Image (cartoon, helix red, strand yellow):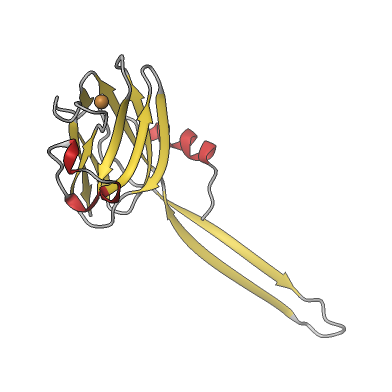
Amino acid sequence: MSVGLRHLQARKLEWHTEGGTRRTTMKKLTLLVALVLVFAGCGDDATSATTTTVEVSDPFGVTARAQDFEFIPTSWTVPSGALLVVDFENQGTVEHTFVVIKDRIVIESLADLDDSLIFRELEAGPGETTSDTFQAPEVPGSYQVICTVPGHLELGMTAELIVEN
Ligand SMILES: [Cu+2]
C-alpha cells in the first residue's frame, strides 16, 4: 500500500483529542480498485474484467508531548497492527526522544538499553515537532516508551504505548 504522508497527516487531524488520544471509531476505508482489461478481439466478444476490493484501516493519530522531564500524557492506547501517525512535540528546553521498546520489555536504566531493543525512535530538539508513521505492534500489551537522552529516564521520562486488539 502506498499512501502519501501528506495525505495521512491531513486525515489524522480527525482523531486528535485534547490531552492525548482516545481510541475512536476506526472507520474502514474501502478502496475499490477496478482493473478493467478490455481486449478488443477481431470479431470476437473477448472482454475480460477484474475487480479487486482492498480494505484499508485509517491511520491512527497519536500526539505525544515531551517536557523537562516527562511525557504528556503518559499512555496512549492504539489498535494492534494499526498504522500510527505519531506527532512528537518537544515543549521542553532540551532535546528529548520518544523511543518505543520492543516486546513489552521494561528498561529501568539507560545502561540496560541496546539498539536491538528499540522498536521505533523519534527525536525532537527543543520547541520542535517530529512526525513519524509506522505500524503498531501486532501483539497486545503495554510497550514502554522512554526518553533516551542520558539521565532523562532516571528522572521519570517513561510512558507506555498500550496495544489492544
Ligand atoms: Cu528527555
Considering depth in this image, is 147 or 87 the residue closer to the camera? 147
Quadrant for the C terminus, please: bottom left
Displayed-image quarter of ligand 1 = top left
Residue 17 in view (yes/no):
no
| Residue 122, above or below 48 | above
Total marks in image: 0
On the rendered structure, is 85 left or right of 51?
Answer: left
Left or right relative to 29: residue 97: left
- Decide: is 56 above or below 11: below
Q: Is residue 116 left or right of residue 105?
A: right
Left or right, 33 with reference to 134: right
Q: Up-down: is 95 above or below 14?
A: above
Compare residues 18 and 32 and report the one nearer the observer: 18
Residue 79 location (% of width, % of height): 28, 49
Residue located at (14% from left, 24% from top): 155
**Quarter where residue 32 is shown:** bottom right
Extreme residue toward the top, this view: 93
**Residue 23 location in percent, x, y?**
26, 41
Q: Residue at x 27, y 42 (%)?
A: 100
User: Is residue 129 visible to us here?
Assistant: yes
Q: In the figure, residue 73 lies in which quadrant?
A: top left
Rendered residue at 81%/85% (across/down): 44
Above-or-below relation of 122 to 105 = above
Residue 112: percent from left, percent from top: 17, 43
Q: Which residue ends up furthest to the front in the rendered image?
A: 111
Q: Nearer the viewer, residue 64 or 20?
A: 64
Q: Position of residue 152 (x, y in %)?
A: 20, 26
